């Protein structure tokens, strides 16, 4: 059954939010065009750690949205039980052995939410998950969250785009950057750098780190806390690590084909510099240091080699919470901008499409409305 009051939508951005929203709208019988300034998944979604989780502390609505996000991935995983791009092999976390160690508090909080968590001393970790050098775990112990997982977003985006085009959706990637067209106070479509105009009843801005700047071009404020992030992909190696590791100096997650994805905030802060031409300079010594940190937490301390490096903005709203829904000052204009967009990728697309198609607000997005920034 289609319940839409609109018949067409144009989406700017073929990252996980844009594509997930696009396929959901197409499933509802809406004609959708997605515009991207290059190949799909060439933004944050192509260089994401993509740990599927609701670990540690945040607002309750955000926790619930993340849990719904994980639920949708579980359904997908049941459809693809042998997928090497979507795994639920758990997550393991520990903190540094200093005054900031929060493992005790994080564990108690997770238990209070019934978020599946086990607090283990280093010696017990091998009993729940493989491939970790227990010597790296600090004396406060680690939390194992068996319900966590990871996804390879480029593979997921490819899968969703296949369904999208089978449903008649159109992906345009050859026309450069696009902008939202606002006429008579309403969003009426989008225009590409090459002058292509795509008119529609609804326009979705899903350009990842570029959302606040692009919304500002239309006079709208969205708080922005986006930092530059670095993701290092290793060459494949045979190694038993299966869980996603979040450790004081490095995060490590398995990836398709036996490689590993690594990231750390300090590595981005110390190792990436913006060049005058707008590109990034990457300090090789910092990348080497990140590989060393990863080897230290992996059983056997393997020699890790770089296969590729991704650099660019990690979308983070100014107050840390997702920004999803209609920009009420401009009818027809919708945005999706969030950190943890891997975890939220499927559910945000589903709920945003629900709002666009039905015109009704979904209660789970109530605290994530973009207009909260308007009065600040
Ligand atoms: C290093 C790193 C680690 C992360 N770790 C996690 C994690 O562990 N768990 C988790 O849940 N999330 C994580 N995230 C966050 C998650 O990856 C992002 O929130 C998510 O990928 C954002 O998707 P998006 O669709 O909003 O943006 P993007 O993937 O950036 O997609 C936006 C697209 O729009 C295109 N575009 C931009 N401007 C224009 C324009 N004017 N015209 C046309 N196209 C345009 C871009 O090229 C891009 O393809 C991480 C991100 C990074 C970078």
Image (tube, rainbow, N blue to C red):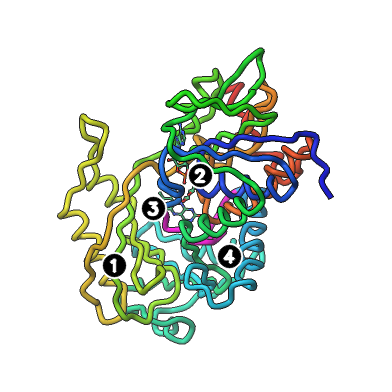
367 in magenta:
no
Question: How crowded is the residue under tag 1: few (<14 C-alpha within 10 Å), some, or many (20+)?
Answer: many
Q: Which residue is mark 2?
A: 14
Residue under the image location 55 percent in, 74 percent down: 146
Q: Which residue is mark 4?
A: 108
State the CA–CA distance, disc 4 to disc 3. Answer: 32 Å
Kindly report which numbered mark, 2 or 3, lies closer to the viewer in this rendering: 2
Relative to 195, residue 119 above or below: below
Q: Which residue is mark 3?
A: 47
Highlighted magenta segment, given as a residue range: 48-58
Question: How crowded is the residue under tag 2: few (<14 C-alpha within 10 Å), some, or many (20+)?
Answer: many
* Among the two numbered marks 3 and 1 on one chain, the one whose residue lies closer to the N terminus: 3
Q: Which residue is mark 1?
A: 294
Q: Are marks 1 and 2 in contact (CB under 8 Å)?
A: no
Kindly report which numbered mark, 1 or 2, lies closer to the viewer in this rendering: 2
Q: Main secondary structure of the magenta part?
A: loop
Task: Provide the secondary structure element on which disc 4 rests.
Answer: helix
Cβ(mark 3) to ligand 1 < 8 Å? Answer: yes
* Among the two numbered marks 2 and 3 on one chain, the one whose residue lies closer to the N terminus: 2
């Amino acid at each position: 059954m289609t319940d839409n009051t609109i018949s067409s939508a144009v989406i700017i951005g073929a990252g996980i939010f844009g594509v997930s929203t696009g396929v959901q709208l197409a499933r509802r019988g809406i004609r959708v065009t997605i515009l991207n300034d290059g190949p799909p998944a060439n933004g944050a979604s192509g260089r994401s750690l993509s740990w599927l989780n609701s670990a540690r502390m945040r607002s309750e609505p955000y926790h619930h949205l993340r849990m719904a996000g994980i639920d949708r991935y579980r359904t997908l995983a049941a459809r693809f039980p042998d997928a090497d791009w979507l795994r639920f092999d758990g997550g393991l976390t520990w903190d540094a052995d200093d005054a900031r160690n929060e493992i005790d508090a994080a564990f108690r909080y997770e238990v209070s939410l019934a978020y599946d968590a086990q607090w283990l001393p280093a010696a017990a970790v091998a009993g729940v998950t493989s491939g970790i050098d227990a010597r790296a775990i600090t004396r406060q112990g680690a939390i194992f969250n068996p319900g966590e997982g990871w996804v390879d977003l480029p593979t997921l985006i490819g899968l969703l785009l296949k369904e999208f085009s089978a449903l008649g959706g159109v992906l345009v990637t050859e026309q450069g950057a696009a902008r939202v067209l606002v006429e008579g106070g309403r969003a009426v479509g989008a225009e590409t750098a090459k002058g292509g105009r795509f008119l529609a009843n609804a326009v979705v801005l899903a350009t990842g780190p570029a959302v606040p700047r692009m919304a500002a071009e239309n006079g709208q404020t969205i708080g922005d806390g986006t930092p530059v992030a670095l993701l290092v992909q290793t060459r494949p190696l045979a190694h038993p690590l299966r869980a996603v590791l979040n450790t004081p100096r490095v995060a490590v997650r398995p990836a398709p084909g036996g490689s590993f994805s690594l990231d750390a905030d300090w590595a981005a802060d110390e190792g990436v510099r913006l060049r005058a031409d707008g590109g990034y300079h990457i300090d090789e010594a910092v990348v080497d240091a990140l590989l060393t940190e990863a080897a230290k937490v992996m059983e056997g301390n393997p020699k890790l080699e770089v296969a590729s490096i991704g650099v660019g903005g990690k979308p983070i709203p100014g107050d840390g919470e997702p920004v999803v829904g209609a920009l009420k000052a401009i009818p027809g204009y919708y945005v999706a901008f969030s950190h943890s967009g891997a975890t939220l990728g499927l559910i945000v697309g589903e709920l945003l499409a629900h709002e666009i198609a039905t015109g009704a607000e979904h209660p789970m997005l109530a605290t994530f409305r973009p207009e909260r920034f308007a009065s600040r």
